[in-house]
Structures are given as structure tokens and as C-alpha cells.
Amino acid sequence: MTECKYYDFNIGRLWDAINVQRESRGLSQKRMMDEINAVNNQIIPMSLETVTGMVARNNTTCQHALHMCRWLDRTLESFLDDVQEIQSFQFPKKGRLYWSMPALAKAVRNQKESQKLTWTQIAQELECSQKQVSSLHKTTYGISIHLAMRITQWLKQTSVEFICERHS
């Protein structure tokens, strides 16, 4: 098997950054989750188990990673394996942010058509299943942060280009 051409999202570094921020501010884990959910996820709050469990799973959804990065004021790209410096990002102070799966699916479909690729070729390129990429347009919540970040790199775009804001 060939080595992946894309930088992986480093869950461990995200977890470390969350803990450094939490400890430097003297927050309990509960208070940290209250803050993360206050702006990002009031409708369906993210649980502490989701955050602490991501390390054991070495995975989380792109939506959850976005909420955590927003709390840190850091870009998703700042947690890619090759990035050494902290890349901050000024997220909007209000409004619910989310990855737009329709926009991501459309960008993948456009790239597929412009390069005359098959879904199998794209899946091989992104090291995922054919179904994961061909059915992106059906995804309602989110995909793995690992796959989302491989896709953005393949598209030569940043994650911010697929982040939308809801004011509800």
C-alpha cells in the first residue's frame, strides 16, 4: 500500500490543545463543555464523552472538530500533521457553524467531472470507500474529520470554504 499523500488531522494534538486551554483558564471539563456548546451546539449539545472518546477512537466527525476548533479559535488546518505553527481564525461570535456537506459534495462532483475521474479512482486517491465519496450528497450530519480534511487537500481548498453559519 502506498503512503497517503495528504496530511492527517491529528486528534491527539487537538486534545492536547483543548486541555491546555481548559487548564490555563482554570475550567472544569463540565464548564469547558458548557462553553463549547454555548455558541456552537445549543440544539444538540456535544457530550464530554464525545470529546474524551475521540482520542481512544482516533476519530471524530468534522462537525465536532469544528466546534472544538472554534472554541480554541484555531483553524482545522492547524491540526494537520505537517503544520507546526498555530493558525488562529476569527470565528463569528454568534451563530451556529457547520460544515456544508452539500457544498463539499458539489466540489467533489465538480472535480470528478472536470478531471473525468470515476468514483473508484477518487476513493483510491482519498483512501476511503467508493460509497463514502459517491454518497457525500446524502450525508446529513458530517463525515470523519480525517476524510473531510483529505478531501479539502485534494480539492486544494481550505476547510473554511465549506463552513457555513446558521443564525437560529
Image (spheres, rainbow, N blue to C red):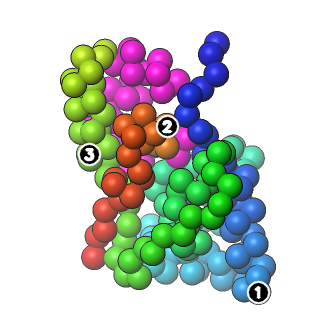
Name the spot of residue 86 as percent of width and height, x first.
63, 64
Tell me which amino acid carries mark 2.
Arg
In terms of image quadrants, where is residue 130? Answer: top left
Alpha carbons under labels 1 and 2: distance apart: 35 Å
| Residue neighbourhood size for the residue with mark 1, other residues' Cα within 10 Å, grouped as few (<14), some (14–19), many (≥20) | few
Numbered disc in front, either 1 or 2: 2
In this view, 117 is above or below 151: above
Sequence-wise, which precedes: disc 3 or disc 2?
3
| Residue neighbourhood size for the residue with mark 2, other residues' Cα within 10 Å, grouped as few (<14), some (14–19), many (≥20) | many
Please name the residue that numbered disc 2 is placed on: 150
Please name the residue that numbered disc 3 is placed on: 102
Secondary element at image label 2: helix
| Mark identifier at residue 26 | 1
Relative placement, left or right, of 93 versus 25 is left
Name the spot of residue 161 as percent of width and height, x first.
33, 54
Task: Looking at the picture, tell me which residue is in the foreground, 157 or 43.
Answer: 157
Tell me the residue at 76%/82% (across/down).
Answer: 24
Secondary element at image label 3: helix
Tell me which amino acid carries mark 3.
Pro
Sequence-wise, which precedes: disc 1 or disc 3?
1
In terms of image quadrants, where is residue 122? Answer: top left
Name the spot of residue 8 as percent of width and height, x first.
61, 40
Q: Which residues are magenta?
A: 119-146
From the image, give the main secondary structure of the stretch colored magenta. Answer: helix
